[in-house]
Image: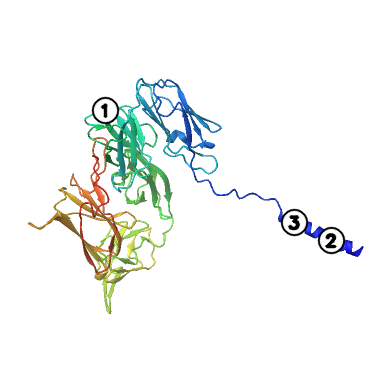
Amino acid sequence: MKSFSIKFWFLLALCVQLAACAKVGSPTGGLRDSLPPVALAFDPPLGATHFNQNGFQIHFDEFVKLGAYRQQLIVSPPLNYELGLKLRGKTLHVQWSDTLAPSTSYVVQFGESISDLNEGNVAGSLVYAFSTGAVLDTGRVRFTLRDAWTGDAVAGARVMLFEQSAARSDSLPAGRPAFVGVSGEDGVCTVSYLPNRSFHVVALVDVDADFEVDPGERFAWLDGPVKSALGPDSTLISRSLYLDAPKGQTSSYTSGVRADSTGVLRLKLVDADLSEVKFEFLDGKGAGLIDGDSVLLASRGATKACVLHSGLRDTLDLFGPTRPLKPAIASRPPAQLDARDTTAVRLRLTAPIEGLVDSLVQVEWAMGDDTLHRTGVRAWTPWTVDPLAMEDGVSSTVTFFPGALLGERVSSDTTALHWKAYQASHYGLLKVQRPFDDAATSVLWVLLDQHDVPVRWAPESAGTAGGSVAGEVVFDRLLPGRYTLVWVDDRNGDGRWTGASQVPLRHPERAVRANQAIEIRSDWEQTLIWESGEAIDGAAPVND
């Protein structure tokens, strides 16, 4: 009996252990599916002729789903109405209500709108083509789309081909395009199944999908017509299109008005051209300042002021201070700065002053063991104070003693500011030389910092007579760091890069970047020879 009891409990424990090992769980599913859906068949077949139906079907090898197809789907030539898409099992049904043109080849491009059901793998480059005539056209054109300033590839832009009858001498072609293509991630766009004739070309980042250039949309065009290359074996030349967005007529607006305890009003503007913003005080005196994206207004007796921007007029009520705001200095210089930058140490005040007492402003200069004390400032306005000029390697301390700044809105406390100018050896120098094989006649050189912001620009000077250099430019006192050099064909000679314009119609100026960053080091001088094809990335950006 005892032996039976031991065997029973042993077998029971074994069963419990086996059950635990066999617990239910989710299967791993194997390797992740990374393959896109494959179109197994088209109905009618791809490349069908004498097409007389109002739709077609695509049969896939797996279940698929539709993304934002209205933004991706392109029909060329364009139809008047949108296509209707429906999924039934593994089959996509495409239908339309338009009447197709006779003897015309049509192309439907799906972009990235179709992907598999589970993993989202996109069926890219999916195209369906057919002809309502006896022959499917085989003409092709190819373009490479890049940003006119950066040179980066422009993806998702439409390349629109217009019949020659739509051409205008002083404006872009009018009406709807005859054929349309879309650029890929590499900026390349190939428009296929074209008839054997020439077209006018416009490229457009068509945000609102209306086939028209709107403010803020980048565009480019070719001055002359382009003829399609026939057949798959014909040589296909890729033409370059460099896109830029023209400066649109935007309407500014006020996003907020705020007043501080000193009675200073800050009016923040959005989309305003600050160079054209004006302000005036209606019934007395006041002080105003354009500060970044805002207008600062303070009363000196006036109770009302108005700000004019983009044809609009905002009227504001002014009031006096309730108490001084401390400290009186709103913007302070950086700890280290360029002594020759006259604006680097400009102090912006939190509220306007009515005067300044030079004898109550002390400036201390120190270099090594030598120290010099002086009183006074270089200049002041109601909103700013410029301390005395500096020199390389000098440490400065400016102290405003009580009573230095005059006015009811400023603090009477002592305020001291300290900064130091870089040593002369801290800077580097870059000399750029351009050989005679460059055909440009008016060259502007631009240096961009690591954030792609222009920090220095200058026109080149003529090269030495009889030498091998057509022109050169010298950038001195450069802070150490990485820079990008940009060559600009400044055709209008205004000393800046000029972008595209729709009215009047104008191509952007050529702008070519060096293909490598330039490393500037302290106390180091280097010379860069700008060789075409070596120092630039790709071909010169001309809409050719």
- Which of the marked residues, 2 or 1, is nearer the chain's N terminus? 2
**Which residue is at a point 26% across and 28% down the rendered structure image?**
197
Q: Is residue 245 visible?
A: no
Label 2 to label 3: alpha-carbon separation? 14 Å
**Which residue is at a point 18% across and 50% down the rendered structure image?**
443
The residue beneath circle 1 is 197
The residue nearer to you, when weighing 6 against 189, is 6
Residue 505, position as x, y percentages in the image: 24, 35
Q: Is residue 100 above or below residue 126?
A: above
Q: Is residue 253 left or right of residue 8?
A: left
Q: Nearer the viewer, mark 2 or mark 1?
A: 2
The residue beneath circle 2 is 9
- Which of the marked residues, 1 or 3, is nearer the chain's N terminus? 3
Q: Give the quarter of the image for residue 76.
A: top left
Q: Amino acid at mark 1?
A: Arg
The residue nearer to you, when weighing 408 against 154, is 154
The residue beneath circle 3 is 18
Q: Amino acid at mark 3?
A: Leu
Q: Is residue 379 above or below residue 144?
A: below
The residue nearer to you, when weighing 179 against 40, is 40
Q: Is residue 309 visible?
A: yes
Q: Give the quarter of the image for residue 462.
A: bottom left
Q: Amino acid at mark 2?
A: Trp
Number of marks in picture: 3
Disc 3 element: helix
Label 2 to label 1: alpha-carbon separation? 92 Å
**Mark linked to residue 307:** none
Disc 1 element: loop
How packed mark 3 is, by other alpha carbons closer than 10 Å (few <14, some 14-19, many 20 or more), is few
**The C terminus appears in which quarter of the rendering?**
top left
Residue 256, position as x, y percentages in the image: 42, 46
